Image (cartoon, coloured by chain):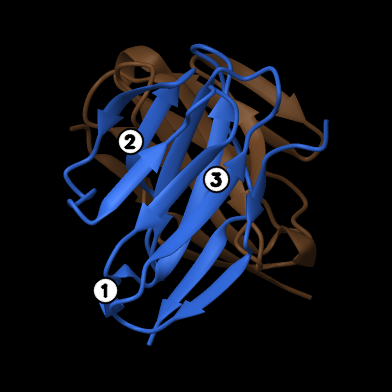
Amino acid sequence: DTGVSQDPRHKITKRGQNVTFRCDPISEHNRLYWYRQTLGQGPEFLTYFQNEAQLEKSRLLSDRFSAERPKGSFSTLEIQRTEQGDSAMYLCASSSLGSEQFFGPGTRLTVL
Amino acid sequence: GIQVEQSPPDLILQEGANSTLRCNFSDSVNNLQWFHQNPWGQLINLFYIPSGTKQNGRLSATTVATERYSLLYISSSQTTDSGVYFCAGDTNAGKSTFGDGTTLTVKP
């Protein structure tokens, strides 16, 4: 296994458009996490899944954001009606239960 | 939620010097980790250290869980050590909270 992968690596979109990001975790990991990182800050937690169940969502995750992990494997994060404030690096991580998290390379979103 | 404070925010060293980075938590945490973020944004795992001391080459880390802090030691620093170092921990085995990082610059 080569680690956590994310696609796309970069996304440029116009304000008001919808975007979707994909994360493929390490295959044996049952937990998957999404974070957002803006310049000069540490990553901020958005949500996490245990298998296919979404167990916690941050207040940062407005109604325009939705995440799914339908079969307990890969996950998607969709942002509807993007705003310039959504521009950030979106990071995905995975872990086994109660263990260290491993991060993917991130998707850098730019909203024009 | 918990607060994570990292110090110093910025650190400039000459190659070969040693350094200590600190991470304080406002509450007891589980699954404490140290990361190095490379210039492309990838978070590289350095240590998974809920308690105790670990060493990996020139790097070592110590976590004193009862006093809610962790230290990262870098010895004989090299220019390739430059970058941002983050610590993170969670209180309920799910939502990890990160500090704002320490930006290390190692000059040749």
- The chain letter under disc 1 is A
- Quadrant position of the N terminus of chain B in the picture: top left
Q: Which of marks 2 and 3 is in front?
A: 2
Q: In this view, does B10 lie above or below A35?
A: below
Q: Quadrant of residue B24?
A: top left
Whole-angstrom CA distance, mark 1 to mark 3, is 35 Å
Q: Which chain is blue?
A: A
Q: Name the residue under label 2.
A: B24
Same subunit under labels 2 and 3?
yes
Task: Indicate which disc residue A85 carries.
Answer: 1
Q: Position of residue B35 (x, y in %)?
A: 58, 43
Q: Which residue is drawn at 26% across and 75% down?
A: A83
Q: What residue type is labelled 2?
A: Asn
| In this view, the mark in front (1 or 2) | 1
Q: Position of residue B86 (x, y in %)?
A: 49, 47
Q: Quick one: label 1, few (<14), some, or many (20+) residues within 10 Å?
A: few
Say which element carries label 3.
strand
Q: Quadrant of the C terminus of chain B?
A: bottom right
Establish whether labels 1 and 3 are both on one chain: no
Q: Residue A109: give x, y in percent of width and height.
A: 47, 70
Q: How far apart are marks 2 and 3 (CA)?
A: 13 Å
Q: Which chain comes out brown in the rendered image? A: B
Q: Which one is nearer the viewer's eye here, B87 or A112?
A: A112
- What's the residue type where badge 3 is placed? Thr
In the rendered image, the vertical position of residue A91 relative to residue A49, given as above or below: below
Q: Is residue B31 above or below residue A10?
A: above
Q: What is the three-letter code of the residue carrying label 1?
A: Gly
Badge 3 is on which residue?
B20
Q: Do the residues labelled 1 and 2 touch (CB within 8 Å)?
A: no
Real-space Cα separation, disc 1 to disc 2, in angstroms: 29 Å
Q: Which of A52 and B85 is in front in this view?
A: A52
How many numbered discs, if any? 3
